[in-house]
Amino acid sequence: MRSWRLAQVLFLALSGTVSVAAQQQSAPELFPVARDGKHGYIDCTGRIVIPLDYDGAKDFHEGFAAVNAGGKWGFLDPDGKRVVEPQFAEILGFFSEGVAAVRVGEKWGYADRSGKLVIEPRFDWAWQFSGGIAPVEREGKYGYIGKDGQIVIPTEFDSAEPFSGDLGVVKRAGKYGYISKDGKLVTPIEFEHAWRFSEGLALVQVDEKYGFLDVHGQLVIPTQFFFADLGGFSEGLAEVITVNYELHYIDKSGKTVLNFGDDWRRNSLTPLTRISVLGGWPKFSEGLATVPKGDLWGFIDHSGKFVIEPRYASAQYFINGLAAVSVWKKKGRDHTNTWGYVDKTGKMAIPPQFESAGWFRGCLADVEMGDKTGYVDRSGKIVWAASKPPKPKQ
């Protein structure tokens, strides 16, 4: 079941429901760092505010962060106080609706913010609560429990996702469908793939084509596209690739409002890489979206006009007024993809200098530079840098 559990994490990451979205909402001002195998937290200036005393440290979420001491996990508050002493073998990562999934021995249950086990560990896997219920696994099958720990939807599925809105995604015999909180199937379990809802619509795949359904389970945009942004709709639009390999933005009626033709196919990205990029980067955010023209990427507004001309080798979407972009730089006989940050006027706010660059979560963004990893602030100052951990031996 480990492969499916990894798929759950990747699913949420690609759909933008955990990493970027949650980080943007919570705007953390403390960031996990590591040096010489020990972990702690810095503030926006790079000052260590929680000492590097831990064996592991995760991001803050809803005012708490999971830390590891001596192989056991607990929670800290922003003052560094251990609100839940390290005692669990594993923690899902953050509190959701007041509880966190924790592992004791080989079984999963849920603890509240005092560390008290409010749902006894008896599941083979447990996920986050959403809308008062959470998916769990027992003997290789998935269902849902309520906040009292009782099964509310039987464990009869091959997988189950946290609810988004009033519906959850379940899988049986290799196909996906949507279920309501009372356990009734809102759609047949017939889709090749199905994703969480975004702005009231969910992406589905049938016969290797993509379309969208509404919260009533009705297919409101037929499965007709070669591909679609796995994040779904953002700011009322979704990016799709038609069967003629044209790059379109459609509205929620399925009507094409922006058509960029097949010019994207001449981009240096291979089609497979392009599909990978579609899983996370091209979408409208803060009024702008990334679009390729020829071999380069730029940013358009909702009218389709390029407000930042295509001049980047690659580009992420905007978060908190800045977007990571890359340019090709010569390095000896080769060229390397180097990342910096651009503002919404097109000005290079932080010159390209990084091997990789993440989104700004509040005041800092995570970056990589040679053999180091660290954080950069919005002025471009590297406030923290430490050697990358050694790669695990094969």
Image (cartoon, helix red, strand yellow):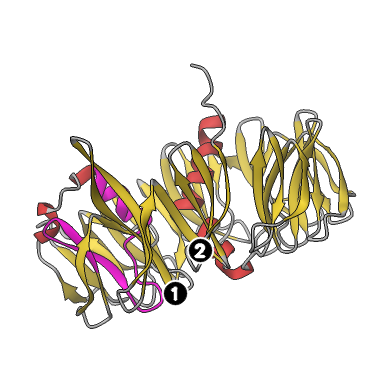
Residue 80's mark?
none
Residue 219 locus on image (x, y percent): 33, 66
Residue pushed farthest top? 394
The three-letter code of the residue at mark 1 reads Gly
The quadrant holding residue 142 is top right
- Position above or below: 285 against 185: below
Say whether residue 293 is magenta. Answer: yes
Give the structural element (helix, strand or loop) at label 2: strand
Give the structural element (helix, strand or loop) at label 1: loop
Q: Which residue in the protein does label 2 denote?
A: 360
In the drawing, does residue 243 fall left or right of residue 237?
left
Q: Are marks 1 and 2 in contact (CB under 8 Å)?
A: yes
Q: Earlier in the sequence, mark 1 or mark 2?
A: 1
Residue 124 locus on image (x, y percent): 69, 34
Q: Residue, x 54% and y 36% (percent of image)?
A: 388
Q: Residue, x 28% and y 47% (percent of image)?
A: 337
Q: Which residue in the protein does label 1 denote?
A: 321
- Position above or below: 307 against 71: below
Q: Residue, x 38% and y 77% (percent of image)?
A: 235
Residue 208 locus on image (x, y percent): 25, 47
Point out the image quarter for the N terminus: top right
In the drawing, does residue 218 fall left or right of residue 1?
left
Residue range highlighted in magenta: 273-298
Report the number of numbered marks.
Answer: 2
Residue 293 in sight: yes
Q: CA distance from mark 1 to mark 2?
A: 9 Å
